[in-house]
Amino acid sequence: MADSAVPVISTGLQNIYITESKICRVDGENGKLYYRGYSIDTIARNSNYEEVAYLLIYGNLPKRQELEAFRQQLKNEREIPDSIVKLIKESANKADPMDVLRTAVSYLSIYDNETKDQSQESNIRKSIRLISKISSIVAAIGRIRDGFDYVHPDKSLGHTENFLYMLKGRRPAKEELVPVEMMYILQAEHSSNASTFSTIVTGSTLSDIYSAVTSGIATLKGPLHGGADEEALRMMYAIGKPENTEKYIEEALAGKQKIMGFGHRVYKAYDPRARIIKDYLLTLQNHASEEVRNLTKIALIAEKMMIDKLGKSHGIWPNVDFFAGPVYRSADIKLEMFTPMFAASRIAGWSAHMLEYWKDNKLIRPLEYYTGQLDLQYIPIDKR
Ligand code: CMC
């Protein structure tokens, strides 16, 4: 290309492939999602978070003994250092939980004597450590924010059950465990989304996995990405009553506001994860709390309006974040914990991508097309 020719610029890296991958296929045209070749519907119906994490990390479903060994490794890694509990105590009430989580995960690297070991075996061990410990950190943040003491993990419990135990200080009821397990499974992986890309960018410099994942957490925080579930629920609270929904959405769209929990860079059809979450929400209605029933009514009216107005015509459909809020509320999870829990689940995907990318690492270094001036004359400060 001649210097003067304007290159094709793909803002937001839209439609740019950065690597080959065998981890996840997002079929945006047809609204389908696959983890390692298994459709998300099959996974959501049959699997559990530990098995999904194993599948993402190792590339195949585990045999019974392999799964048991993996579960045991996760259990053995659950405890977090006292200084991280102290950090959470000092910051949980002053800072956004995602800021506390990002700092705590970065801090974790100091306690791992393998941080600098870039062998695949060590990175698998660290991935398992991170999958285990991030859940403990998120639970500790939620619990300490609520004014309670840190609860140590319980090795007799499964991964999400232990998360809820550490968050709530008691073993969860089935009605709390089922939706949280479902959300953990559905949010575990999603191809080269912004946070995974940012994880890979950091990892591609051959920085360690803690640094890479810290980048991922920082990126997940934003409302255009992982933070959308919180914003969608805030909107439902702001709407208040089902009868206010139509006016609210009309006015928001007229004011060119985005409706959080709708739209996606890749899906131009209904996000299959949103459908699974919605279906679950609909099964709850007879025994759900008044709050959840009210939120569900608001969500259904908003969904119908958005699909009528922007669905087929503009390819804007509900995404994973839209129905997540009412579902989390059915398990009495506070809004501020949604995005940290997203991270506690997505760590499996981030790790899987790092392990895959490092097998054939290439530094990520795109170009910018410079449109500023050149060869300006430097004028001394007292003459400007
Ligand atoms: N509500 C109203 N209009 C929308 C929405 C929405 N949620 N999403 C996109 N649009 C419109 C947008 O205003 C723009 O219109 P116009 O061409 O007239 O300016 C057009 O659709 C294209 O939008 P864009 O933001 O340029 O497209 P994108 O591919 O960059 O957007 C997105 C993807 C997810 C950032 C966007 O849909 C959005 O901001 N949605 C709300 C936030 C959200 O729910 N994020 C979670 C995404 S799913 C979880 C994850 O993987 O992170």
Image (cartoon, rainbow, N blue to C red):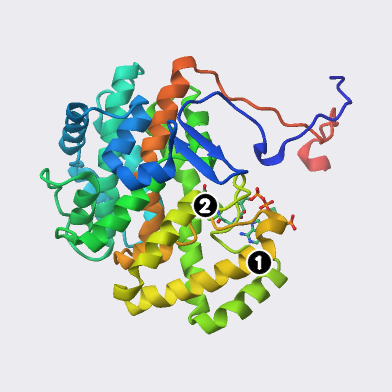
Quadrant of the rendered image containing residue 51: top left
Rendered location of residue 11, percent (x, y): 71, 40
Residue 274: x and y in percent read: 48, 55
In percent of the image, x 34 and y 47: which residue is there? 45
The residue tagged 2 is: 222
Frontmost residue, 191 versus 303: 303
Specify the quadrant that holds the N terminus: top right
Q: Is residue 324 left or right of residue 12?
A: left
Q: In the rendering, at what x and y percent does residue 224 appear?
A: 56, 53
Please determine whether, in this image, residue 359 is positioned above or below residue 238.
Answer: above
Q: Is residue 310 left or right of residue 125?
A: right
Please identify the quadrant where the C terminus is shown: top right
| Quarter of image, ligand 1 | bottom right
Q: Is residue 1 above or below residue 335?
A: above
- Whether residue 144 appears in this view of the structure is no
Determine the residue positioned at 51% across, 34% down.
Answer: 25
